Image (cartoon, rainbow, N blue to C red):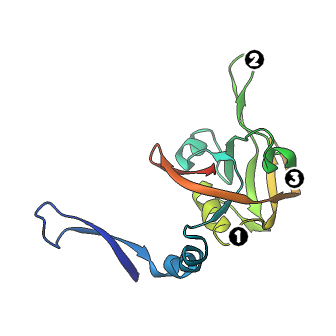
Amino acid sequence: MIGINTAIFTQTGTSAGVGFAIPSSTVLKITPQLIQFGKVRRAGLNVEFAPDPTAYQLNVRNGALILKVPGGSAAAKAGLAPTGRSFAGNIILGDIIVAVDGKPIKGKSDLLRVLDDYGVGDHVTLTIRRGAETRGNLAVRRGEHLMRIRSSHLQAVAV
């Protein structure tokens, strides 16, 4: 991999240790945005997804499990359902995104990689699984999101 060095972790203070770099393909993608807007603008669905290990524990083997959908968001208006609990306290799985514009999704990390190819305001068609039923042609317009690190996983947060 070819990249641009961004930091180095060293215990001696020298230029020897573990280096951290941004892949050159990412740099090529974000440089025009940095020049135009002064920041990187990423599109997202404005929902919170379960980390892949958590989804796997809930028996979700394919797709990205939706945990939370903010009220009034484009995702809520499109009808995406969050994960919740029944009156008895049992977990009721939310929608599981299994494809974006026909591209299969294996998990949250796969979904984030696929969504990185789209821009703010683009329309995407989601194929979701709700219970035993698979529904297609759910159109969502993507808004601008800021990526933050929380609980050692990436999460899309509306700005």
Q: Residues within 10 Å of mark 2 (few under 14, many from 20)?
A: few
Disc 3 is placed on an element classified as strand
For the view shown, which residue lies furthest in the left direction? 12
Q: Which disc, if any, is residue 133?
A: none
Question: On the rendered image, what quadrant is the N terminus found in?
Answer: bottom left
Q: CA–CA distance between discs 1 and 3?
A: 24 Å
- Residue named by callout 2: 87
Query: What residue is rendered at 81% in x and 60% in y?
Result: 141
Q: CA–CA distance between discs 2 and 1?
A: 40 Å
- Residue named by callout 1: 119
Relative horizontal placement of residue 19, taking residue 49 as reference (left or right):
left
Relative horizontal placement of residue 32, taking residue 124 as reference (left or right):
left
Earlier residue among tags 1 and 3: 1
Earlier residue among tags 2 and 1: 2
Disc 2 is placed on an element classified as loop
Q: Position of residue 128 (x, y in %)?
A: 80, 52
Q: Which amino acid, mark 1?
A: Gly
Q: Position of residue 119 (x, y in %)?
A: 70, 70
Relative horizontal placement of residue 113, taking residue 12 as reference (left or right):
right
Query: What residue is rendered at 55% in x and 67% in y?
Result: 39
**46 or 100: which is nearer to us?**
46
Q: State whether residue 107 appears in this view.
A: no
Q: Which amino acid, mark 3?
A: Arg
Earlier residue among tags 3 and 2: 2
Q: Which disc, if any, is residue 135?
A: 3
